Image (cartoon, rainbow, N blue to C red):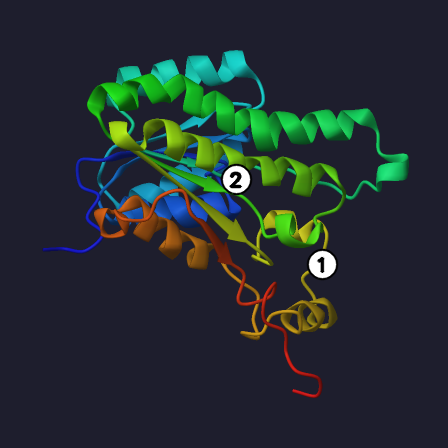
């Protein structure tokens, strides 16, 4: 039997037009899933969709949607269910942060972080959960962050909203596991994405500094997260429920000894 076979499944990936989201969409497509990419930027979304279609001949689409606006999410989910009939795998990946020290933070920064990082996850789950329950199957993968362990991420808005995602995963597992819904959370750190590069330039000095923070000795890639998400999306991970998987190259728990 082929491992990680997603044939016949439909996967929706928010923030799937770049970074970690695109890194997840690609292997899911390669494993045979129909793919729906959600994003706000049409140009990058169409480019991502073209790349998906180079990988797989399965049905795929890009839909423009601001995940922080409920009416847009509801309309988008209605379109998905009309065109694809069902959603089996939901990857809630869309996220946002900026450098904003608390003492000078504009309240709009907090509101935007809550809207995208937290509300956007809830909105997509709320709009798709009844269909999953009707089918007695749903696999929800939420992309959180390792900043919930150290408080980093540009300001209080980011670890606070990402920490709430753990509660969503626990709540989903408590309420729906017996009805065919499975949920898990990926907590990445130092992944080479546009979000990371908005804070850290891609130059030799900066990359050397970042690599020194990771015991494995390298910055993570979207492909690393994609491989993990593929496992979680497949039946091979069927006994994993309500888990937070820290995918950070050992950065949080294991440090290089001095002089190594």
User: Number of callouts in the render?
Assistant: 2
Residue underneath mark 1 = 201
Crowd band around label 2 with a 10 angstrom C-alpha radius: few (<14), some (14–19), many (20+):
many
Q: Disc 2 on helix, strand or loop?
A: helix
Q: Secondary structure at mark 1?
A: loop
Q: Is residue 242 left or right of residue 1?
A: right
Label 1 vs 2, first from the N-terminus:
2
Q: Is residue 29 visible?
A: yes
Above-or-below relation of 224 to 164: below
Camera sees residue 54: no
Q: What is the x, y in percent for residue 20?
A: 49, 48
Can you say which quadrant of the picture contains the C terminus? bottom right
Q: Nearer the viewer, residue 202 or 25?
A: 25
Name which quarter of the figure residue 77 lies in. top left
- State the residue position of label 2: 166
Q: Measured along the vertical axis of the image, is residue 41 above or below residue 198?
A: above
Q: Residue at x 56, y 57 (%)?
A: 191
**In the displayed structure, does residue 2 sit left or right of residue 40?**
left
Q: Is residue 146 above or below residue 210?
A: above
Q: Position of residue 54 (x, y in %)?
A: 30, 47
Q: Position of residue 194 (x, y in %)?
A: 61, 48
Query: Closer to the camera: disc 1 or disc 2?
Result: 2
Out of 96 and 168, give the one closest to the viewer.
Answer: 168
| Contact flag, marks 1 and 2 (Cβ < 8 Å) | no
Res 170 label: none
Residue lying at 84% horizontally and 34% vertically, measured from the top left? 105
Dot 1 crowding, Cα within 10 Å, few <14, some 14–19, many 20+? few
Report the side of 44 relative to 3 (left or right): right
**Whole-number angstrom distance, CA of label 1 to CA of label 2:** 30 Å
Q: Residue at x 58, y 30 (%)?
A: 118
Residue sticking out furthest to the right? 103
Does 8 sit left or right of 200 as displayed? Answer: left
């Amino acid at each position: 039997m082929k491992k990680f076979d997603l044939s016949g499944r439909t996967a929706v990936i928010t923030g799937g037009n770049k970074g970690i989201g695109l890194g997840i969409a690609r292997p899911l497509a390669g494993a045979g899933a129909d793919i729906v990419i959600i994003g706000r930027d049409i140009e990058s979304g169409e480019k991502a969709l073209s790349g998906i279609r180079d990988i797989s001949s399965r049905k795929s689409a890009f839909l423009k949607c601001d995940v922080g606006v409920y009416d847009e999410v509801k309309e988008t989910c209605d379109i998905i269910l009309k065109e694809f009939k069902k959603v089996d795998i939901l990857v809630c990946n869309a996220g946002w942060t900026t450098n904003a020290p608390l003492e000078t933070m504009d309240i709009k920064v907090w509101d935007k972080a809550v809207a995208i990082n937290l509300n956007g996850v809830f909105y997509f789950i709320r709009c798709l959960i009844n269909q999953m329950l009707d089918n007695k199957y749903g696999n929800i993968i939420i992309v959180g962050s390792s900043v919930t362990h150290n408080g980093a991420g540009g300001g209080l808005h980011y670890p606070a909203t990402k920490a709430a995602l753990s509660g969503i995963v626990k709540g989903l597992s408590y309420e729906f596991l017996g009805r065919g819904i499975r949920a898990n959370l990926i907590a990445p750190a130092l992944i080479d994405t546009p979000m990371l590069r908005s804070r850290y330039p891609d130059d030799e000095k900066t990359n050397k500094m970042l690599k020194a923070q990771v015991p494995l000795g390298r910055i993570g890639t979207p492909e690393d997260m994609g491989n993990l998400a593929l496992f979680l999306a497949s039946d091979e991970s069927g006994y994993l429920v309500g888990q937070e998987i820290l995918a950070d190259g050992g950065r949080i728990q294991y440090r290089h000894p001095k002089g190594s």
